[in-house]
Amino acid sequence: MDWQRSLWKMAACIGILILGISVFSNIETIFPWERGLPDVFNMLFIESSLLAFSAPAFLVILFFVLTPLFQPLRIVRFQKRETLAWTVFRTVFFTVLIYLAAYFAFGFLFAWLKTGSLQNTWATKEGTPYLLYKDEIDLSLFATPYMILRYGLTEFSAFLFLGLAAAFLYLLSDRYIYAFFLVVGFLIFDFALHSLFMISLFLNKAAVRLGTWGDGKDLLGIVLYFFGLSVVLMIGIFILLLRKDFLSQSGKKE
């Protein structure tokens, strides 16, 4: 992976992402600063934030680390297509891991600076879950360890699916720009589909909200859903790599 060569590009993308969210956060009616750190942090993982900021930024960063793998001089280094396939999978995996680690760290810092508190108010009777649902809600579901698990597993499995989808479409079309707009177009379509018919294939499952918080069984269902789709995409990528004629595509630009 070209992490060192692409470092400044990745940093620029994350910087633009942070700037965009910071500007968006000035809308006081959308971001409830007065409630607590979890409320602010959670706003970074709702459907609109995923659609407008985090998903597109991730796809741009993935471009810088994925497309160099398919340069003609790189291709000849892989003696087997199976090796290239596993390299693609590792590239997507670690890109997701590093991107989410940076995004989570920024989200935590951002929420702390906005609220001036490190307290997990969602686990208390002063927090938003209890204020909305009173005794109907189990506050143990908002304990810090489970919240970390909820955000971490949900977003990792969701972004792994996005990354593999972009890789699959890139191999299919030979142009990453096509893959980018197809994935973003799918997200826009999914957002509209959920708004009109309450049906969602991605955003409603990838977003973390109080209304869909759920317990361990719900979390497992979401993770298995995305990992199942990811396995299908991995098989598709593997088949495409075995059949693809890279020599005929060597004259094309990424």
Image (cartoon, rainbow, N blue to C red):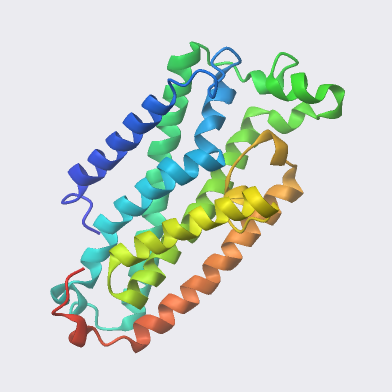
Q: Residue at x 53, y 57 (%)?
A: 189
Residue 184 or 161: which is nearer the viewer? 184
Vertically, is 79 above or below 195?
below
Left or right? Give the position of 149 relative to 52: right
Left or right? Give the position of 227 relative to 107: right
Instruction: Indicate the position of residue 152 as horizontal and vertical percent values.
Output: 54, 43
Instruction: Indicate the position of residue 157 as horizontal and vertical percent values.
Output: 54, 54
Q: Residue at x 76, y 26 (%)?
A: 139
Residue 133 or 223: which is nearer the viewer? 133
The quadrant of the rendering that contains the C terminus is bottom left
Left or right? Give the position of 61 relative to 112: left
The image quadrant that residue 89 belongs to is bottom left
Q: Residue at x 30, y 51 (%)?
A: 61
Vertically, is 252 above or below 210?
below
Residue 96 or 203: which is nearer the viewer? 203
Instruction: Indicate the position of residue 212 as horizontal and vertical percent values.
Output: 70, 41
Question: What is the total number of numbered labels drawn onto the structure image?
Answer: 0
Vertically, is 81 above or below 98?
below
The quadrant of the rendering that contains the N terminus is bottom left
Residue projecting furthest to the right: 135
Instruction: Indicate the position of residue 66 as horizontal and vertical percent values.
Output: 29, 62
Residue projecting furthest to the front: 196
Residue 98 or 251: which is nearer the viewer? 251
Q: Residue at x 81, y 29 (%)?
A: 137
